[in-house]
Amino acid sequence: MNTKTQKLAQETIVSPISEETALVNTATGEIIEPVQTSESAVTRFTPFQSAFTVAKQEGIIYTVGHPRQYRADCKAGQFKIGESAMKGKEMSLEIISYRVFEAELFNYPPQSWLEVFFVDAENALSHILFKGISIENFITLYTDILIKRRSIGEGITTGRMEKRSNDKGDYYIVEFSWKENTPERVQELVEFTEAHALVNARFAQL
């Protein structure tokens, strides 16, 4: 094992779908090679962290590997964090990466999902999923921005819950609007995204 591989071996993660351990380049997220490990080899203890120490972060807040989890609750017509922290009918997103993919999630039948990583109004790296008509609304916005020869990351996207009704009752969809951000802020977002390798094959564009 060469010096590079020895260093990477000290920064292993356990695959969630097998008993293999993947060697990961922590700068890019690239999987270098899988290696078989015993249970004792992947059981490790990290030191306790002081509850009175403020992590030294400047600018955008990001707990590595754990972006803030938002949800678009289209039954309640609210954006929320987690299961119950309601944040209102409108939310601003400084989008840094996104993709559309097909999957069977949260007991829904197989369908398209829009996955977005963004910085929220409190300057924290965040994550959200959209489905259904909300995806079509996003693509409409995306196309309008392309016509202007701009990129969606150059602005602030606003998601807003809009009420609709059918024979089953009331529900909400997400409508999107966009306005330009400042060049200084866009540069900060670009540098943050590159530093944390948040745009790669896993977060492909439409």
Image: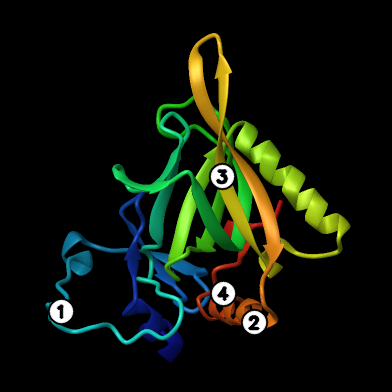
Label 3: state its secondary structure: strand
- Read off the residue under disc 4: 193
Give the Cα distance between marks 1 and 2.
33 Å
Give the Cα distance between marks 3 and 4.
25 Å
Give the Cα distance between marks 1 and 3.
39 Å
| Horizontal side of residue 163 vs 125, given as left or right | right
Q: Which mark is residue 49?
A: 1
Q: Nearer the viewer, mark 1 or mark 3?
A: 3
Label 1: state its secondary structure: loop
Q: Earlier in the sequence, mark 3 or mark 4?
A: 3
Q: Measured from the top left, where is residue 187 in percent x and y?
A: 64, 82
**Count the marks: how many?**
4
Q: Earlier in the sequence, mark 1 or mark 2?
A: 1
* Residue at (13, 82) in percent of width and height: 52
Mark 1–mark 3 contact, CB under 8 Å?
A: no
- Read off the residue under disc 3: 160
Choose top left, top right, bottom left or bottom right for residue 71. top left
Using the image as rendered, state which of residue 89 and residue 47 is in the foreground. 89
Mark 2 neighbour class, 10 Å CA radius: few under 14, some 14 to 19, many 20 or more: few
Mark 1 neighbour class, 10 Å CA radius: few under 14, some 14 to 19, many 20 or more: few
Q: Which mark is residue 187?
A: 2
Q: Nearer the viewer, mark 3 or mark 4?
A: 3
